[in-house]
Image (spheres, grey):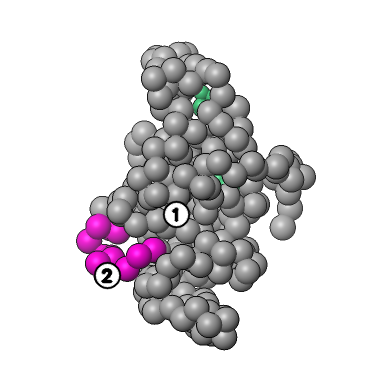
Amino acid sequence: MIITREKPLQEILGFLQPYKKVLVVGCDGCVQPPRSLRESERMASLIELARSSSGNPIQISATTVSRQCCAEGLQNQLKVEGYEALLSMACGVGVQVMNSVFPSLPTFPAQNTLFIGYETKREGEMFENCRACGECMLGETGGICPVARCAKGLMNGPCGGCVEGKCEVPVEIRNWKGEVVQTLKNDCAWYLIYQRLKELNRLDLFRKLRLPKNWGIAGYPRRL
Ligand code: SF4
Ligand code: SF4
């Protein structure tokens, strides 16, 4: 179960400011409170109203998918031709999967992901890419999360340990007994962020100085 809270409208309007044709994509999956078609349509209406009243009109539509965290499902269910940007109503994982499935478009987050619960059944290899920090910054990092994917959680990067796009911090894969079965090098998150922002012609976001995050929101143990 993934709990989110809607971002302030002004922040979302800031992400979408350069774009004229935008698709809001809901998620019928585990995100709570619900962020499906009804919520996506409401969000699209708010954005449309705000943009037309500021003299910068936008063409905006809303849809939903069964789960934004499934790459195969997104490929089959979502038609993004004709849009300049996507706005995700899902959690930080959904935003990142949308960015990887539709690399020609930027996907921006409409939610702050607060809290991720757990499941007891494991079906295969898993990659963590959201730590539910409560202040989602994917809108400034090309849809790649430095909180979860940079070994040092840096707000500005890369650090001096980035060599040929790889992070200096090794990743140890362990079996259920806790034994190390594989050691590998991860891609440097900030290298990936740079490449992605360059691809999107948004290196202005890479140059921006990001101040320290408010880690108080992400402190454990948490209650909602
Ligand atoms: S910045 Fe990263 S950890 Fe924080 S909510 Fe967004 S994806 Fe999750
Ligand atoms: S090399 Fe990249 S991913 Fe590794 S700690 Fe430095 S900035 Fe983070």
Numbered-mark total: 2
Whether residue 44 is in magenta: the answer is: no
Label 2 crowd bin: few (<14), some (14–19), many (20+), radius 10 Å: few
Q: Distance of mark 1 from mark 2, alpha carbons?
A: 19 Å
Q: Does any atom of ligand 1 lie closer than 8 Å to the CB of label 1?
A: yes
Q: Is residue 72 left or right of residue 23?
A: left
Depicted 36 relative to depicted 92: above or below: below
Disc 1 + disc 2, Cβ < 8 Å: no
Q: Which label's residue is closer to the chain start, 1 or 2?
A: 2
> Where residue 82 is drawn, which disc sits there?
2
Give x and y (percent) for residue 184: 40, 17
What's the residue type where badge 2 is placed?
Answer: Gly
> Does residue 71 appear in the picture of this structure?
no
Q: Residue at x 35, y 40 (%)?
A: 123
User: Which residues fall within the magenta stretch?
Assistant: 73-85
Based on the displayed image, in which of its 4 quarters is residue 127 positioned?
top left
Residue 174, x across and y down, in percent: 45, 20
The image shows residue 204 at horizontal and vertical percentages of 51, 47
Q: Secondary structure at mark 2?
A: loop
Furthest residue in direction left, as rendered:
76
Residue name at image x 63 percent, y 69 percent: 10
Q: Hey, which quadrant is residue 2 in on the image?
A: bottom right
Residue at screen point 55% across, 41% down: 207
Q: Which residue is mark 1?
A: 95
Q: Nearer the viewer, residue 103 or 180?
A: 103
Quarter of the C terminus within the rendering: bottom right
Q: Nearer the viewer, mark 1 or mark 2?
A: 2
Q: Amino acid at mark 1?
A: Val
Please tell me the numbered disc located at residue 115: none
